[in-house]
Amino acid sequence: MAASESCEVLVVGGGIHGVGVAQAAAAAGYQTILLEKTALAAGTSCRSSKLVHGGLRYLESRQFSLVRESLRERALLIRLAPKLVRWQKFFLPVYPTTSRRPWLLRTGLSLYAVMAGWDPHSLFRTVPRKDWEGLDGLKTDQLQSVLQYWDGQTDDAALTHAVMQSAQELGAELRCPASCHAVEIAEDGCLIRYEYQQELRECRAATVVNAAGPWANAVLARVTPEVPSMPVENVQGTHLELPGPVDQGCYYLEMPIDRRAVFVMPWGQRTLLGTTEHVYTGDPAHAKPLDVEREYLLAGYRHFFPNRSREVLDAWTGLRVLPTGGGKAFGRSRETQLPVDNQRRPRLVTVFGGKLTSYRATAEKVMGVLQRTLDRRPPRCSTAELPLAPVDWPDEKAGIWTI
């Protein structure tokens, strides 16, 4: 056993939420260590839909606070990370079978614009009929209307690496690959046992943040005294990469079979198509695209883009952590849950759920919880003012999407 070390905030998980917490903790002046078992952004944080968006569809389920927060964070990220996050056109085509009629979409887009503060990129328009033929081969037969608005697109893995670099510049330490074996919670802090560089180590931390995403409940199973897990499900979302980019922007499509939203997006020199929603109960490391998901996505793509190639160049799946509940996953809340071991003086906080777009806001909420326990001190800086720049890292897909 190597000599023990100590810190004030220890984070388990190197996805976007883990690195966001590490950045926020270091910015607040706390000694911070992050443990990641394989590689930064190795899980869901490199397999998302690559969108930095307010969540237009969440208006239907009245998740207004989530949309407002996401729109605020979208604006921040575009300002702080202009080489990582950019504005992208989004098109909403309307056909006779589209359940949301143009008047309803205009109402939703108007509310979206109001909540975004009516900045220039919050405005939307109706695409003139004469321009429809230029929409990347979108089916124009029976097309009734096309609305265009703006949202953000990013390289999710590149963003994760940039946030971790920011955290390290503020003093946070990264241990990778490092496997968390056990967490013992006591009144005066936590003892964490983990493996790093082929040796077992110990770290005494005032607080621990479990940001392991789909593995969060597995981490909780290693905690003593026992901390209850949350009733959540891992819901897999599959994306397909197809030949040639869509040049005009992203397409927000309503699938004819079930009225779900699916996106068709430019991704490097390819087109990205996704996503699906299937409850996954196995080891998160073994999640993979299903044949039924491929067929579902390609059927929708064929319906809307009948003349584009449907050759699948690559396929991958990510896992979202959603609250267990009745009904389809598509309609469940996307609000982040932050359960703790002790409400009065929390030593352990777990991050369940959360959106890529609002990772920074989630990290600030986590720090708000931890400061019930940690000693107050003057912050080094605010994460709302920290610029983010691209980072080189040894990954075969590094730089696939650049501005």
Image (spheres, rainbow, N blue to C red):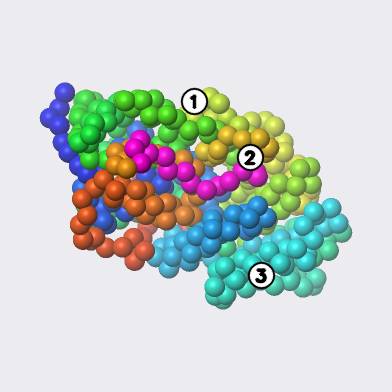
Inspect the image, locate mark 2, and give the three-letter code of the amino acid beneath it: Ala
Residue 201 in magenta? no
Whichever of callouts 1 and 2 sits on the residue coming sooner in the sequence is: 1
Q: Quadrant of residue 217?
A: top left
Which residue has dot 3 on it?
A: 110
Is 402 placed above or below 209 here? below
* Residue in the image at 34% along x and 48% along y: 369
For residue 283, which numbered disc appears in the image?
1
Between circles 3 and 1, the one closer to the viewer is 3
Give how far apart the Cα atoms at labels 1 and 2 are. Answer: 19 Å
In this rendering, does residue 242 appear at all? no
Inspect the image, locate mark 3, and give the three-letter code of the amino acid beneath it: Ser
Is 115 placed above or below 214 here? below
Whichever of callouts 3 and 2 sits on the residue coming sooner in the sequence is: 3
Q: Main secondary structure of the magenta part?
A: loop
Whichever of callouts 3 and 1 sits on the residue coming sooner in the sequence is: 3
226 vs 378, left or right, is: right
